[in-house]
Image (cartoon, rainbow, N blue to C red):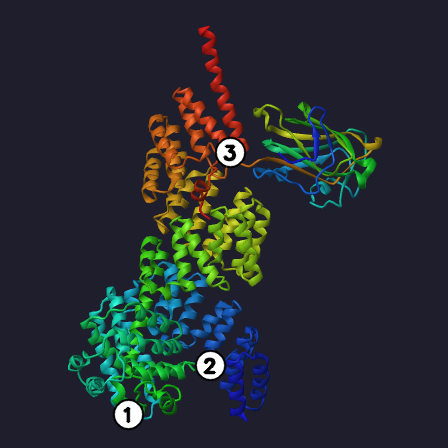
């Protein structure tokens, strides 16, 4: 009965029938109490969103798996101390349960507790254990301490992946022998050698190579012959094989072959494969040298592909069919290992029969799969890291390197959108986000940034519509409420906006942006103390959230505490050294503290940093006018007037300065234009007052003349 | 300026009222930073009811006319508009008829700024504090006093359901002489 129950529970878990699973698991535990069954019940509870139940039943368990699940439950219940204790209860670091996942969890715990260095260490270990633990790298990026993607996802990572994935091969395929294990070792050495040739910059090439490898169709006799050689190659050195493999058919055939491969690949690995395949499809022109590599890779690939499928229960049929198709050289291997040889896809059934879970995998295809995955991660890692360093232009260039299919995924589009936002290019950001939202209306991550973009563009209607849409999709996601808040804020209803942002915070305490937005609203309501509190809360969650530093600086400027303001802007600039807006306000703070030379220098820096930013020039002109340097100010403003003719304040300031230099005609002209351009009521009053005072001295003059 | 259903400028009469308060974008409510007091009130219908955003509750005076509502600020503020919610259909003889708005530094030097006569109002009534001169768009003052000089049907006491006081929005960009108007400038002017 025990095994029956265990199987049933597992099946229920995979089919998401949690209450049934819990029920059966309780029966199981009653009759057969054991640690393993206890873990199974905990898994049921965790899947069903009952971390407290899992917490109670696992309390005091000692086995690593139990400790990991217990730590996870504690983490979900926000009991960070207990979670940490559970993960660390053995002294040796090696034995952290859950491997990479355990280290990642520990890293998160340390980060939430504010222990940055320990968390960084844990994330690094997690990455070295499992290079595919992308989240660890993302955390490192957001902490600002990520290493270059090429080192993290480089040779060491490849070897690590090979070590973890290749040995499993043996378990599955009947025919697989130690020979093949040796093959894989050699192959891995080959690969590492091969990979050292392909130093980071060659991503595209690598991919193309792999494509070629994958494409080599199985049906030519030449290749069969070659395959025997490649077998030999597996055992010995790769080079002898290459010349023969060069007889590979032309690229066009590859394309045809590729499609089915693509399917299979994708089914095996989901996303990573997609990228792999897409990269293949994107580059169409193989070259001589690449063909060689591709041949090697092709041979390698078949096994890795099979290899991976055991872990993925859904990928088998298509995988085997695909593998069947791309089996060139390894046809011989196939026979020896018991795998079916495929001619033109007839091997599917054979493969399936002999290897129900896609056992015998070609170590070479595994290698190429690994290297492709790592290359993709390198690009994404580079881009992500650049974005977090606010090196946005570079990030955009890096993301352009991706294949079209990978680029159009939600995550990448969000990254690209955020890069545009950081560059203050709200129009491009708008188009990217709109596209992403259309394609993936269910994906809410990053929609808070989208709502900010619409806020900046003053698109009230679209913002309102977006907010309503998001809330309809998920009332419990903080991003939806951030969007609503931004809508009310755009309509100047700051109280309502504050309410929305507070709701977002309730839903997720650690949603940094919601705290910052709260701060902005409170500042708009002139409640500077509470605004400060909100900003500091945001900073306690994420010190590198430079918007909060900026917000703090602005509140200090409003309160006329200019030295404090300077300090905040300096910190903000340390995090994002390219933001012209921060530089502008830093300049203002300096000017108000009478450090005028530095202020002007800062404005120059701002102008250089972003030539499209009109504010920096306007502020500069204002400072010059305040310092009495009217002619320079006029020059700057005249330039600005040409590039932004619709801005009332430019003309108003021009008028004011012309009045100072006694060019009354021009002053009146500019005041008139300013009034025409719809200034706010108080400004209109000011301008009219200035105009009246101008006309009076004129009248006095004419009277005198008369 | 707020929209009004009908107003004849010469006589300062306002009839009707709006159900919803419709305002310009560049106005903001200033009542939160003020101390509110009234000349007299009936227990249970005190000064809180004027600021509770609830149109069901009302302030009821309990003394001699004129009944006064005093709004005192800590520093001089620029005010542009006063909005009152009154309803003749519900309050009949308690509805104010002649209202005088006065401003000054304190109780000792209040001067009348505006005087209006309401004719069977029902809803939000906006009293603009601006004079005809563009320089007089705002009233720059420490204190505002709203005096109910007489009621409809010669009622003795008065009901007011809600009051809001509006002034111009300050420049969101600190230390700048003028506000930005174009989208481009505004987009670049803040980080969010």
In this view, the residue in front, A257 or A122, is: A257
Residues tagged 1 and 2 counted as in contact (Cβ below 8 A): no
Marker disc for residue A343: none
User: Which chain is indicated by disc 3?
Assistant: A
Q: Is residue A688 above or below residue A523?
A: above
The Cα atoms of the two marked residues, 2 and 3, are separated by 72 Å
User: SS class of the residue under badge 3?
Assistant: loop
User: Which chain is indicated by disc 2?
Assistant: A
**Crowd tier of the residue under label 1, counting other residues whose Cα lies within 10 Å: few below 14, some 14–19, many 20 or above:** few
User: SS class of the residue under badge 2?
Assistant: loop
Q: Quadrant of residue A45?
A: bottom right
Asked if residue A197 lies left or right of residue B19, the reply is left
Asked if residue A317 lies left or right of residue A4, the reply is left
Residue of label 3: A678
Marker disc for residue A62: 2
Residue of label 1: A335
């Amino acid at each position: 009965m025990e095994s029956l129950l265990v199987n049933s529970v597992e099946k229920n878990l995979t089919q998401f029938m949690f209450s049934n699973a819990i029920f059966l698991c309780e029966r199981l535990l009653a009759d057969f109490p054991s640690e393993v069954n206890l873990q199974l019940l905990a898994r049921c509870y965790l899947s069903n969103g009952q971390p407290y139940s899992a917490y109670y039943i696992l309390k005091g368990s000692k086995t690593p798996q139990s400790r990991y699940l217990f730590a996870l439950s504690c983490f979900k219940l926000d009991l960070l101390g207990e979670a940490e204790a559970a993960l660390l209860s053995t002294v040796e670091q090696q034995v952290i349960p859950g491997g990479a996942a355990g280290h990642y969890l520990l890293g998160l715990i340390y980060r939430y507790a504010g222990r940055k260095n320990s968390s960084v260490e844990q994330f690094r270990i997690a990455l070295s254990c499992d290079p595919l633990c992308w989240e660890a790298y993302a955390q490192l990026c957001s902490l600002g301490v990520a290493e270059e993607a090429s080192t993290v996802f480089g040779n060491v990572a490849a070897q690590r992946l090979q070590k973890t994935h290749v040995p499993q091969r043996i378990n599955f395929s009947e025919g697989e022998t130690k020979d093949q294990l040796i093959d894989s070792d050699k192959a891995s050495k080959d690969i590492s050698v091969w990979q050292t040739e392909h130093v980071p910059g060659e991503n595209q090439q690598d991919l193309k190579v792999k494509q070629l490898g994958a494409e080599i169709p199985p049906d030519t006799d030449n290749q069969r012959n070659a395959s025997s050689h490649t077998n030999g190659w597996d055992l010995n050195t790769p080079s002898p094989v290459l010349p023969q493999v060069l007889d590979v058919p032309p690229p066009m055939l590859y394309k045809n072959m590729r499609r089915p491969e693509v399917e299979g690949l994708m089914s095996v690995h989901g996303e990573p494969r997609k990228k792999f395949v897409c990269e293949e499809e994107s580059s169409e022109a193989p070259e001589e040298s690449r063909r060689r590599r591709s041949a090697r890779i092709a041979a390698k690939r078949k096994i890795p592909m099979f290899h991976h499928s055991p872990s993925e229960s859904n990928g088998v049929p298509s995988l085997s069919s695909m593998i069947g198709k791309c089996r060139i050289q390894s046809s011989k291997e196939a026979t020896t290992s018991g795998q079916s040889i495929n001619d033109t896809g007839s091997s599917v059934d054979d493969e399936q029969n002999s290897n129900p879970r896609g056992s015998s995998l070609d170590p070479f295809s595994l290698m190429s799969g690994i290297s492709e995955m790592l290359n993709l991660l390198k690009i994404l890692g580079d881009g992500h890291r650049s974005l977090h360093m606010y090196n946005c232009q570079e990030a955009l260039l890096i993301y352009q390197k991706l294949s079209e299919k990978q680029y159009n995924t939600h995550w990448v589009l969000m990254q690209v959108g955020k890069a545009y936002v950081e560059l203050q290019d709200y129009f491009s950001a708008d188009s990217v986000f709109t596209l992403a939202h259309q394609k993936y209306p269910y994906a809410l991550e990053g929609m808070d940034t989208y709502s900010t973009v619409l806020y900046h563009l003053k698109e009230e209607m679209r913002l309102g519509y977006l907010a309503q849409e998001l809330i309809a999709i998920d009332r419990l996601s903080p991003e939806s409420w951030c969007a609503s808040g931004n809508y009310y804020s755009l309509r100047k209803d700051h109280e309502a906006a504050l309410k929305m942002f507070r709701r977002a915070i309730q839903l997720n305490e650690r949603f940094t942006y919601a705290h910052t937005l709260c701060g902005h609203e409170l500042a708009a309501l002139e409640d500077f103390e509470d605004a400060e509190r909100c900003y500091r809360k945001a900073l306690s969650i994420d010190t590198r959230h430079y918007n909060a530093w900026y917000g703090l600086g602005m509140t200090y400027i409003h309160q006329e505490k200019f030295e404090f303001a300077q300090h905040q802007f300096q910190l903000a600039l340390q995090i994002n050294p390219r933001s012209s807006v921060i530089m502008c306000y830093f300049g203002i703070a300096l000017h108000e503290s009478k450090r005028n030379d530095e202020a002007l220098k800062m404005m120059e820096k701002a102008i250089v940093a972003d030539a499209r930013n009109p504010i920096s020039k306007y502020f500069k002109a204002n400072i010059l006018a305040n310092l009495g340097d009217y002619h320079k100010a006029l020059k700057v403003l005249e330039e600005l007037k040409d590039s932004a003719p619709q801005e009332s304040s430019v003309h108003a300031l021009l008028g004011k300065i012309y009045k100072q230099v006694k060019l009354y005609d021009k002053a009146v002209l500019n005041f008139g234009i300013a009034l025409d351009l719809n200034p706010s009521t108080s400004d209109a009053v000011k301008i009219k007052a200035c105009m009246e005072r101008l006309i009076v001295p004129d009248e006095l003059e004419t009277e005198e003349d008369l | 300026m707020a929209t009004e259903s009908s107003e004849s400028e010469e006589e300062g009469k306002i009839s009707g009222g709006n159900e919803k308060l419709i305002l310009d974008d560049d106005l903001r409510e200033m009542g939160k930073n003020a101390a509110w007091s009234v000349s007299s009130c009936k227990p249970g219908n005190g000064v809180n009811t004027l600021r509770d955003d609830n149109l069901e509750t009302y302030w009821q005076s309990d003394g001699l006319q004129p009944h006064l509502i005093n709004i005192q600020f800590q520093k001089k503020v620029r005010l542009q508009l006063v909005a009152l919610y009154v309803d003749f259909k519900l309050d009949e003889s308690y509805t104010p008829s002649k209202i005088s708005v006065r401003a000054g530094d304190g109780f000792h030097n209040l001067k009348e700024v505006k005087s209006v006569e309401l004719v069977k109002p029902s809803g939000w009534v906006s009293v603009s504090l601006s004079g005809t001169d563009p320089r007089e768009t705002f009233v720059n003052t420490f204190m505002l006093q709203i005096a109910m000089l007489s009621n409809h049907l010669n009622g003795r006491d008065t009901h007011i359901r809600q009051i809001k006081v509006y002034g111009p929005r300050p420049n969101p960009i600190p230390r700048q002489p003028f506000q930005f108007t174009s989208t481009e400038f505004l987009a670049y002017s803040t980080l969010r």
